[in-house]
Image: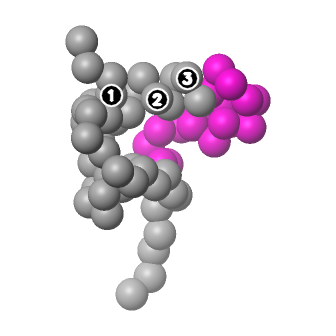
Amino acid sequence: MSATFAYLIGDMSALLERYALAFADLGAVRIAVDQELAGVEAPLRGVREVAFFPPMTGG
């Protein structure tokens, strides 16, 4: 089994309450992997950069 972002989010959520709150609604969180959008089931192997951010609107 390879680790995924779902696994990472679970670990982070268990680490600190503020992370649990931030990840409570995954529909409101976006994940960028090496500057490309990815889903929670994307594998962590070989990833160099991860960014979590709320969705943005505007032009």
Magenta span of residues: 13-29
Provide residue 22's location: percent of width, then percent of height.
63, 42
- Mark pair 2, 1: CA separation: 6 Å
Give the residue at mark 3: 11
Question: 10 left or right of 35?
Answer: right
Where the C terminus falls, by quadrant?
Answer: bottom left
Q: Quadrant of residue 24?
A: top right
Residue type at numbered disc 3: Asp
At horizontal 49% and vertical 52% (from top left) the residue drawn is: 52
Residue type at numbered disc 2: Leu
Q: Helix or strand or loop: what does disc 3 sit on?
A: helix
- Mark pair 2, 3: CA separation: 5 Å
Give the crowd class for mark 1: few <14, some 14-19, many >=20 residues within 10 Å.
some
Give the crowd class for mark 3: few <14, some 14-19, many >=20 residues within 10 Å.
few
Determine whether 43 is above or below 36 in the image.
above
Question: 12 left or right of 32?
Answer: right
Between discs 1 and 3, the one toward the N terminus: 1
Residue found at the far top of this picture? 1
Give the crowd class for mark 2: few <14, some 14-19, many >=20 residues within 10 Å.
few
- Mark pair 1, 3: CA separation: 11 Å
Q: Does 17 lie within the magenta span?
A: yes
Q: Main secondary structure of the magenta part?
A: helix
Provide residue 51's location: percent of width, then percent of height.
46, 55
Give the residue at mark 2: 8
At horizontal 65% and vertical 30% (from top left) the residue drawn is: 20
Q: Circles 2 and 1: CB distance less than 8 Å?
A: yes
Q: Helix or strand or loop: what does disc 1 sit on?
A: loop
At horizontal 66% and vertical 36% (from top left) the residue drawn is: 19
Q: Helix or strand or loop: what does disc 2 sit on?
A: helix
Give the residue at mark 1: 4
Q: Quadrant of residue 11?
A: top right
